[in-house]
Amino acid sequence: MLPLPRPILQILEKFWRWGVVQKRRKDGRRIRSGEWPLKLPVPVISVGNITVGGTGKTPTVIALARAWQQQGGHPGILSRGYRSGPDGNDEYRMLKEALPLVPHVQHKDRFHAGKLLLLNHPETDLILLDDGFQHRRLYRDLNLLLCDASDPFGGGYCLPLGRLREPVDAVKRAGHILLTRAERCRADWLDQVSAYFRQNHPDIPVSRCATTATGLETLDGDHVSNPDVGHWLAFSAIGDPSGFRHTLEKFGLKVAKEVRYRDHHHFSALDMSRLASTANKSDCTGLVCTAKDAVKVRELELPAEVRQRIHVLGIDLDLPAETILRGFNRD
């Protein structure tokens, strides 16, 4: 599909902004009347952003949940379940694999989902609201706003001209700003971005977070020691595939071929067969994907020779979890 001319995108962007303003007014009336926000009996931390595309929300939720568990806590997770099937969407399944003991409920009514989670898991003492920055109905004790450090405002325009979900003045709703993917930026750029937020929003703490690769695993979860750096075919269906490639290359893998699918793409056995064929033609060592993609690929019935060639890149976040969780003591 050919991109629309910029004048048309500018008109459509104005309509998007108008829609955001109308939603804000509607939400504001409910908040001023006392109808919203609805409060759950345990603290809630919302993890969200103001741009479309990946900023690392799901890995951040995983890191915060693990940090809370290490403190002896019992976290739970709520999410809307965008493009969710009977078994949840890909983020749901990724979180289940990474946090098998953490209850997670997906429902568009996050307050109802929270009550259900607490009913079935009364030991829960902290709830993480995944992708909740635009959700105003549920009260949160902390609004954690994730911004890609390399491009915090998605080009400065709302959809479809830029990548902003809402205008940048939404930053004022944040309780803490986390600059993600800091490893992709020069130190002077990081200082400049941090200074911008501190000057314009002096009351909002600003932290940085970097993504690091932990190694390769087979599709069945076995660690690969001393992987061949070779030439790899990288495939992904995520919001920010360029970030995936950057992490691969920083880990030392040579990406000879890259195939990008639409975010939340449902992989098929035919997709994998075609990817394997492309890898063969490009003399690739193997195929590599993200953990988010792997939860869908793992469920496919694949020939052994294809399955054995698919690998998963593990990642970890250098996240200031203690700083973010500081106000949520378990006394």
Image: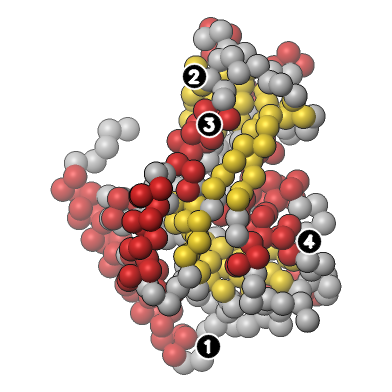
313 relative to 107, above or below: above
Neighbour class for label 1 at 10 Å: few (<14), some, many (≥20)?
Answer: few
Q: Earlier in the sequence, mark 3 or mark 4?
A: 4
Secondary structure of residue under mark 4: helix
Question: Which residue is depicted at the point 72% across and 60% down?
Answer: 67
Of tags 3 and 2, which is closer to the observer? 3
Q: Alpha carbon of mark 2 to alpha carbon of mark 1: how far?
A: 52 Å
112 relative to 59, above or below: below
Of tags 1 and 4, which is closer to the observer? 4
In the rendered structure, which amino acid carries the disc numbered 4?
Gln
Neighbour class for label 4 at 10 Å: few (<14), some, many (≥20)?
Answer: few
Q: Earlier in the sequence, mark 2 or mark 4?
A: 4
- Residue placed under numbered mark 2 in the picture: 257
Along the line of sight, which residue is nearer the eye, 200 or 279? 200
Q: Answer left or right for 286 relative to 52.
A: right
Q: Earlier in the sequence, mark 3 or mark 2?
A: 3
Of tags 3 and 1, which is closer to the observer? 3
Q: Are marks 3 and 4 in contact (CB under 8 Å)?
A: no
Q: Alpha carbon of mark 1 to alpha carbon of mark 4: how far?
A: 36 Å
Secondary structure of residue under mark 3: helix
Along the line of sight, which residue is nearer the eye, 151 or 89? 151
Q: How is the image coloured?
A: secondary structure
Residue 277 seen in the figure: no
Residue 204 picture location, percent across and down? 45, 73
- Residue placed under numbered mark 1 in the picture: 35
Q: Earlier in the sequence, mark 1 or mark 4?
A: 1
Residue 176 picture location, percent across and down? 50, 69
- Residue placed under numbered mark 3 in the picture: 250
Secondary structure of residue under mark 2: strand
Q: Are marks 1 and 4 in contact (CB under 8 Å)?
A: no
Secondary structure of residue under mark 1: loop
